[in-house]
Image: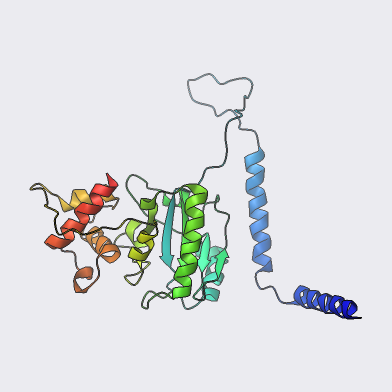
Amino acid sequence: MKQYSRLLLWVIAAAVYSCAPKPYAATNKIYRQQAKQLATTLKAAPGAIPVDGAPTAANWIGTTNFNLRKPNYVIIHHTAQGSCDTTFNTFTLPRTQVSAHYVVCKDGTVNHMLNDYLRAWHAGLAKWGNVTDMNSCSIGIELDNNGFVPFEPKQINSLLVLLDSLKHRYNIPAANFIGHGDIAPGRKVDPSAFFPWQQLAEKGYGLWYSDTSKILLPVDFSSKQALRIVGYDTRDTSAAIKAFKRHFISGESAGNAQLSEGEKKILFSLMQQSE
């Protein structure tokens, strides 16, 4: 009798779940359709691409040595929206033209919205070092936060677990865990000055600095050159300095575009780690 009761409860639960509203069923169907189209593209044999003035091969020869390209950067964002539900809606409306691979809610729930090997639209117009198409080589992670309050501990804990998985799965270097504001200075500020970059760096996700009091700056030290070596786009030097300070400097001076002697030493230390 007990076994029958358990079976009946399981059937009822399954029926309730199957009848429960699924608000993103339509967009999930679109996801599968688009993924199927991309798979069809991948399965197609490469055709000969005509090159003016050069002979083309009569027969196609496919190499046997290949695999999928993998991400080499992780870009962290804050959503600047009121809730995870608002972000889900934004990421499932075609007209918004924005997305990310992961969304981490305030309660620590991790939502994997896009296959890591597919190209999300999260970085926009951005540059880091010599890389000018960050979307093509990175994973985008959005944290549910409006940019004006500290991040929830549960959220950061889940983020650390996720970063550990991504780092080991794709062998991503520590220096390649950065923020949207780092790659788009002057245009973006996320994940805000409240984000605990030092905590992440201590776990191996991002660079940080140790005691800089004994550092002697070279006579010819150039802040602009050092920022460029770290990775910042220095076409707007003031914006690059502000982005650097938002990431690495806390306190009253973090919002201005001037570097103190101590801040230059921090920059010098990071430059040495980046060379």
Residue 258 in sight in this render:
yes
Give the residue at x 36% y 65%: 199
The C terminus is located in which quarter? Answer: top left
Q: Quadrant of residue 245?
A: bottom left
Quarter placement of the N terminus: bottom right
Query: Looking at the image, which is closer to me, 136 or 56?
Result: 136
Residue 104 image offset from top left, x and y in percent: 50, 68
Q: Is residue 144 visible in this depiction of the protein? A: no
Closer to the camera, 192 or 58?
192
| Image vertical order of residue 240 relative to residue 6, above or below | above
Give the residue furthest to the left: 219
Horizontal relation, residue 200 to residue 114: left or right: left
Residue lying furthest right in this view? 1
Q: Is residue 176 above or below residue 14?
A: above
In percent of width and height, residue 165 lies at: 51, 56
139 w.r.t. 152: above or below: above
Q: How many marks?
A: 0
Of 145 and 211, which appears nearest the observer? 211
Q: Position of residue 29 (x, y in %)?
A: 68, 61
Q: Quadrant of residue 259?
A: bottom left
- The location of residue 30, given as percent across then percent down, is 66, 60
Q: Horizontal placement of 167 versus 64: left or right?
A: left
Left or right: where 37 falls relative to 78: right
Q: Report whether 142 appears left or right of 113.
A: left
